[in-house]
Structures are given as C-alpha cells and as structure tokens.
Image (cartoon, helix red, strand yellow):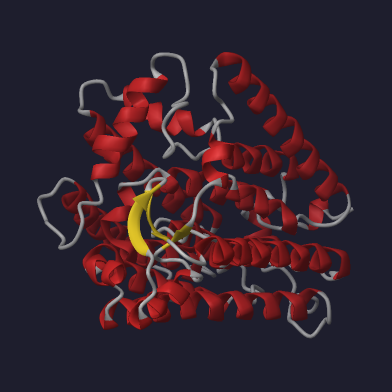
Amino acid sequence: MKTRNPAALLVIWALTRALLLLCVFKVVVVPGPDVTSDVSVIYQGWFDVLRTGTFPLDDVTWQYPPAAAVAILSPALLPFLSYASAFFLLAFLADAAVFLMLLYADRRGMARRGVWVWVAGLPLLGQTVYARYDVMVTAVAVAALLAAARHPRAAGVLAALGAMLKVWPALLLVGARRGRATREAWGAAVLTAGGLALTCAVAMPGAFAFLTFQRDRGTEVESLGALVFHVARRFGWSGTVQLNYGSVEFLGPAVPLVSVLAQGLTGLALGWLVLWRLRARTWGEGTPADAGLTAVLLFTTTSRVISPQYMLWLVGLAAVCLLFRDSRMTLPVWLVLAATFVTFLEFPLWFSHVVASDTLGLTLLVVRNGLLVAATLSACRRLWRSTVTGSGRAARVPAPPHVERSGLSGAASSS
C-alpha cells in the first residue's frame, strides 16, 4: 500500500471496476439475491413517479431526503440506455470521480495509502456498490472533506447537498476547525440546506413524506439490535422475519423495545460527539476527517438498520482519513475494510442463512457487527486522545509539504 506508482493504482482500479460492472450487468453471476432489482424495480418505479411532478407519497419505501430525487432521475441524462444500464454507468462515474479526487489530493504520492483504501476496499462490498445510489452520495461527502481544510464554505455547501441526498453527510461538519472555519462551514450548510428544502417543498408535493416512513421502521435483520432476535429465535421467540418498509426486518414481541433502545444508543452517540466537540482543544491536519469517520461509525453502528451499502460511506471516509499522515484512524480503517468484506459474505452471498438465523448467518453477523463496534470504539478513543487529552500525534506532527500544496492544509482557515 506504500507504492508511489499511480499506474498500479489505475490498473487495479480499472480491473476491479470492470469486474463490478460485469456483475451488475449479470455477465458474472454472484450467488444470492439479485441486488440489481432495487434499481430496475424500485428506483425505476420512483423515477416514473418523480417525472410526474410529485414525490412517491404513497410508497413507504421512499425514505430519503428530497434531493435524492436528483440521483433517482439522473439516468435521464443517458436516454439512449435503459434505466438500469444508465444508473450503473452513472454509479461507475461517481466511483471514478472519488478515485480522481483522492489521487489529485495525493498527487505527490507521499500518503497514497488513502487512495489504496478506495481502490482495494470498495470492491470488497461486491456488486452492491453500483446497485445503490450511495456511491453518488459518498462522492459528494468525499469532496466535502477534501474541501474542508482550505475552503470551509465549499465544504459546508457540499455537506448540506450530501445531507439532502441521504442525511449522513451532515455529520462531517462536526470536525470543522474551531473559529472562522466552523462559522463559515456551518453557516453555508444551513443556508444551502434551507434553500434546497424550500425549493423542493415548493416545486413538488410530498418533499418531506419520507420523515414518517423513516420513523416507522423497525429492526432490520443485519443491525446490531437484531442479534437479540437471531439468538431468541433459537429459544422459541414467536416473531417473524418479513419484508417491511423496504428492508427485511424482525416483527413481533419486543421488537419496538429494541428499536427504541437502538435510538437511545444513537442519542448517546450524539451526546458523545457534542461532548467531544466541547472538550477538543487540538486540531491536527487530519482531525476533520478523523472526526467525520468517527461520527458516521457511531451512527451506523447504533442504527436500527445497517444496510450493506452503508459500508460505502465508511470506506470513502476511511480513504480520506489515510490521506493525512497524522491521522489516528489506521486501526479503525482496517477494521472497516474487514467488516466490508464480511458484509459481502452475509449479503448477498449467504443472506438466506442470515434470514434463517442459522449458525452461519449468526456467525457472519456477530463478526461483522463486532468489527463495526470495535472500529467505532477504537475511533472514539483515538479521536479523544489526539484532540482532548493531547496524547496523540496531532499536536506534534506538522503538515507534510504535499498536503499544504494539495489544498488539504487547514492552517489558512484556523484563525
């Protein structure tokens, strides 16, 4: 991972992405559920509704902020292709955009490990990468983090755009450097999000119907809380596994309680982030990226739903973290990459075992969710030590010359 040869990166990126395209176009068939059906059935159904000038008001699977309509409608840019084919190619282009942004940010090759995380880490998730619009959201989030050091207003605009696509990029603002950078980034984000929300609400009815649908979701079978029911089924628990609100969820006794407890954990995660923000005193070059990864890990791990595509977010943020030589996230990044590969094993490869709660399915979930918990706790500890207690390297390591020239230095915005 320390090679400075961009040709090796390009060759491996091209080969792995060609394989992903072959998978989504079904030239290479991967065992398990057809992950592309979400695009050809659900996304295309939303596309047909959105073209009539309204959001999918009566479809409980529509659980996304209003700007998600842009991603769903984007295949219209390639009218000479079928909807699914156009979507896969646009997802591929979003992947390419992230690769080029990371490569440009690290163009002197002194911290190329971050680029390698994206090149080698993304294919670990399999064909799901191009069969969900999350790769497009991740591209926006990566751009926001890369802009944060020198252009906080641009970072705020991009984070807000990402949040209006799928909420989670708003978490990236937690790591903005104190002072003017925070005021500029947060102010730009509020204005951008407010403007987009107002525009969407005026332009089309039902812009915020997703809030009700999202609120009513239960405990998805791959989530951390779901482990309770996977084990309980072995002791006669009377609940069922059903397709509900667009995902496979547990329904039955105690499910609402576990869902509430998961939301409580998410609330505690938010509280920890607020406490960290108030206590942090030392900002290294990589602190905004480290804080962003930590925040998204916290909210992903404690969520009632851990869909496979959520790993895309973590891989993208992990790649940005390791562009910085003072990043404290090396161990959490390795844990995220391991969890990404195990996610591919549990979905789609052996998803039937997960749904059945058999030994293989339970083992895969324990390992994957265990890796996410370990990554989250490690990230929290490392972020706290490097910024609050002062025992990390953030206060001691100067920015390498290539970081300053590539626009990743935060010194210009720290006043």
Is the N terminus in the top left, top right, bottom left or bottom right quadrant?
bottom left
Q: Is residue 93 left or right of residue 382?
A: left
Residue 373 in percent (x, y) is at: 55, 77
Q: In this view, does 55 lie above or below 341?
A: above
Picture residue at 57% right of the left edge, 15% below the top: 203
Residue 374 in percent (x, y) is at: 55, 81
Q: Can residue 240 be seen in this view?
A: yes
Q: Is residue 290 visible?
A: no
Picture residue at 64% right of the left edge, 26% below the top: 196
**Looking at this rendering, what residue extends furthest in the bottom direction?**
391
Q: In this view, does 158 lie to the left or right of 224?
A: right
Quadrant for residue 205, please give it.
top right
Residue 244 in percent (x, y) is at: 38, 49
Q: Is residue 173 above or below residue 235?
A: above
Quadrant for residue 199, please give it.
top right
Picture residue at 81% right of the left edge, 41% below the top: 184
Q: Is residue 364 left or right of residue 4?
A: left
Residue 165 in percent (x, y) is at: 53, 38
Which sits in the foreground, 126 or 235? 235
Picture residue at 83% right of the left edge, 67% below the top: 275
Q: In this view, does 180 lie above or below 74?
A: below
